[in-house]
Image (cartoon, rainbow, N blue to C red):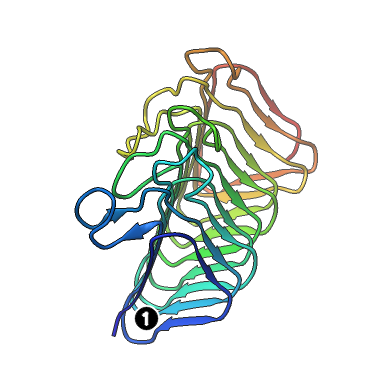
Amino acid sequence: GNTEIIGGGSIDLAGVVSASSGQLTVRAGYQLGGYYGNSGPSANGGNLTISGTLAAQYGVWLAAEAGDSSGANGNILQSAGSISSAYGNIAIEGGGNVTLNGSTTAYGGSGSIRSGFADVTGTPYGGNINLGGNLYFGSFVDLFAYSGGSGTAGNGHIVQNGGSLASNGAIGLYADGNIGLQGRVETPGSLYIYAGLDNGFSSGYHYYQSAYGGDVGFGAGSVVYGSHVEIVANRGTTGDSLGNIRQEAGGLLHVTGVTSLYAYAAGNVDLLGA
């Protein structure tokens, strides 16, 4: 059957948690009959820390609510270990930052990863997505990083420090702020890399310019594959970002389709790799 873990504060999972024939749900900073009158986010929210093994047959949903505190909560940190689903989808939603340094695998499903996002209530704090592990999805995967209103916990950046992000379907990277790729990103389908977008407060709409804008950077160790690749860097309405696209020497951008690369930068485009 299903496995559900709900904590009004923070949750630390260092062992094995499984739903061998159902869905696994873990929600930090959430309580039944809670602060908002009915079931909902707790007053102070909570963080979710993972260093063990989380496995389910039919999907995984992980969430951490920020609550009404100063933005210190709502973070999801996977320092090691694994998150996997055999047939269902994987959804990871943090009111603050989301950091994935272990493995995350949806063998037969899709993925959705959101930072600075609250499932029940909007968060004004925003958050970043930090990737250092290996992620694979049998279907498509979308990553959304929201800057929020005050930006005290993050500015909606997506940063891949290493590891890999792979999917058998489309991959979408949508950041209110910057996107920096230092590892491997690979799909046989379409790849969308959009920085400086307005993902909306918690709506998921991502085709508008954000206030601060964002740059797209491909590091010297980046390896990027897609049959159709779109790269967009918006300047933003405040001018905090110039909206540049830059690939460092040593980086690889490989478009497998015919004439299927689209790049738009409000600022400069510098492709110094291959």
Question: What residue sits 30% from the left and 38% below the top?
Answer: 203
Residue nearest the observer in this picture, 169 or 36: 36
Q: Relative to residue 97, is residue 85 drawn left or right?
A: left
Residue 61 shows up from this direction: no
State the residue lying farthest toward the top: 238
Residue nearest the observer in this picture, 130 or 41: 41
Q: Relative to residue 227, is residue 274 drawn left or right?
A: right
Residue 116 to residue 263: above or below:
below
Q: Could you say whether the residue bearing mark 1 is in a helix, strand or loop?
A: loop
Residue nearest the observer in this picture, 1 or 10: 10
Residue nearest the observer in this picture, 61 or 13: 13
Residue 175 to residue 57: above or below:
above
Could you tell me how many numbered marks the image carries? 1
As shown in the figure, which amino acid type bears the numbered disc 1?
Gln
| Residue topped by disc 1 | 57
Question: What residue sits 53% from the left and 18% below the top?
Answer: 235
Crowd tier of the residue under label 1, counting other residues whose Cα lies within 10 Å: few below 14, some 14–19, many 20 or above: many
State the residue lying farthest toward the left: 38
Q: Relative to residue 111, is residue 49 drawn left or right?
A: right
Q: Position of residue 162 (x, y in %)?
A: 70, 54
Question: What residue sits 73% from the left and 41% below the top?
Answer: 219
Q: Quadrant of the N terminus?
A: bottom left
Q: Position of residue 42 (x, y in %)?
A: 35, 53
Q: Position of residue 239 (x, y in %)?
A: 56, 12
Q: Position of residue 179 (x, y in %)?
A: 59, 37
Q: Relative to residue 13, is residue 218 drawn left or right?
A: right
Residue 9 to residue 152: above or below:
below
Residue 94 shows up from this direction: yes
